[in-house]
Image (spheres, grey):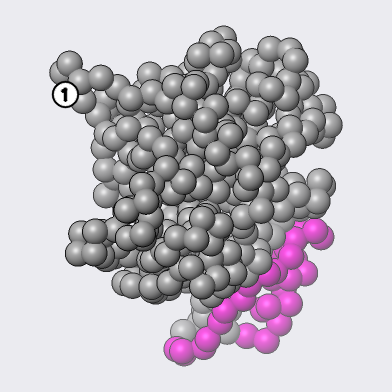
Amino acid sequence: MEKGKTIYFPSIDNVKVAADTIKKVSAVTPLSPSLRYSKQFDANILLKREDLQQVRSYKIRGAYNKISSLTAEESASGVVCASAGNHAQGVALSCKLLKIKGSIYMPAPTPNQKVEQVKMFGEDYIEIKLIGDTYDDAYNAAMKECAEQKKTFIHPFNDEKVIEGQATIGMEILEQTTGPIDYVFIAVGGGGLASGLSTVFKTLSPNTKIIGVEPEGAPSMKVSLQNGVNTELDDIEKFIDGAAVKRVGDLTFEICKANLHDMITVPEGKVCETILELYNKDAIVVEPAGALSISALDFYAEEIKGKNVVCVVSGSNNDITRTAEIKERALLYANLKHYFIVKFPQRAGALREFVVDILGPNDDITFFQYAKKTNRENGSAVVGIQLKSSDDLEPLITKMKQRNFFGDYLNNKPDLFQFLV
């Protein structure tokens, strides 16, 4: 930041105005105790259920607050946004409710389910434009339309009115509790939610520790804080799409730098475990970004014992077609799913020997790809094996080596692994 330049922080008065502005469209979502997580971590764990908003994420707060603040001239000109996810839905619903025309740019590969959701919320007030292969392509096209047609760009996070809208979550949490809150865990993508909420707590509950949580594969805020300057990453893992950005906002970086107690990352596989647990044990559907805050509890288990802890569940726009990948990533993270190149002797009975004599009684073959292309003594197959316990891995590898079936282990070879599986 330039020397002498004042950092913007959302004022409590502005957050109160935002809360009044959005009350017609944004639900005061429940702050629900989680008996299971409270018992697991020996703490009082509360879930702020932003997944229960009409658009199934908190994004309606910032989008509606920003679009409501436009002048009559700006409203007449229309708005533009670039998003393939929750922000697009928030903007679309806001356009319909405020009767403002909007252009929503999305990358061409955006799943049809997301496109249809945006259409449903925006109806005739929005036009969806599928442009390019990436978010950057869509963003650049959106900015071009803004410049050429004098329209207002609705930024997903780097905007004062958007930040003030997201900050209303912090105000609600404090109004919904009577005792002190020791920790709040919150997902960080571009940083809009973290900036708004952390400023409210810094002002009204300064002893509360705000913990930002990013995907391990997209640590843009963590890297920026470590560098002391907002830093754009060259490459990111986009699986947790609701929190995967290459560069956080300039406004949000400065606020988070001042307000966050800690900024941590969580492996994508751990997030997948949490998604499945919430669905199977609590009947709660969350998207990957929505599970980030809860996934972080494992990494703060000692610190939060006996404490009052809030996790913001940021959204539930999960695509059911991703379920297989979520399960796969969860099993890999738990060290229960393993891929090998197995060398099978070119003789009758070799596969039976592998199944009967090498696999354990609880091991299960979940993937098998084999083609005999040579006349060599051994033919290789890619085999995926699911274990009951991670302790079964070493005995399995030992038996494979003793009987000359072992070719290679693929889990720790990411390039080869992604190509084959």
Q: Quadrant of residue 338?
A: bottom right
- Considering every residue shown, the one lying at the far top of the view is 207
Residue 1, x across and y down, in percent: 21, 25
Which residue is more in the foreground, 324 or 359? Answer: 324
Res. 263 in view: no
Region rendered in magenta: 347-375
Which residue is more in the foreground, 274 or 28? Answer: 28
Which residue is more in the foreground, 18 or 297? Answer: 18
SS label for mark 1? loop
Is 366 on the left or on the right of 207, as rendered? right
Q: At label 1, which amino acid type do we have?
A: Glu
**Residue 352 falls inside the magenta stretch:** yes
Per the image, the residue denoted by label 1 is: 2
Q: Residue at x 58, y 34 (%)?
A: 20
Residue 342, x across and y down, in percent: 56, 69
Looking at the image, residue 225 lies above or below residue 145: above
Q: Residue at x 66, y 16 (%)?
A: 181
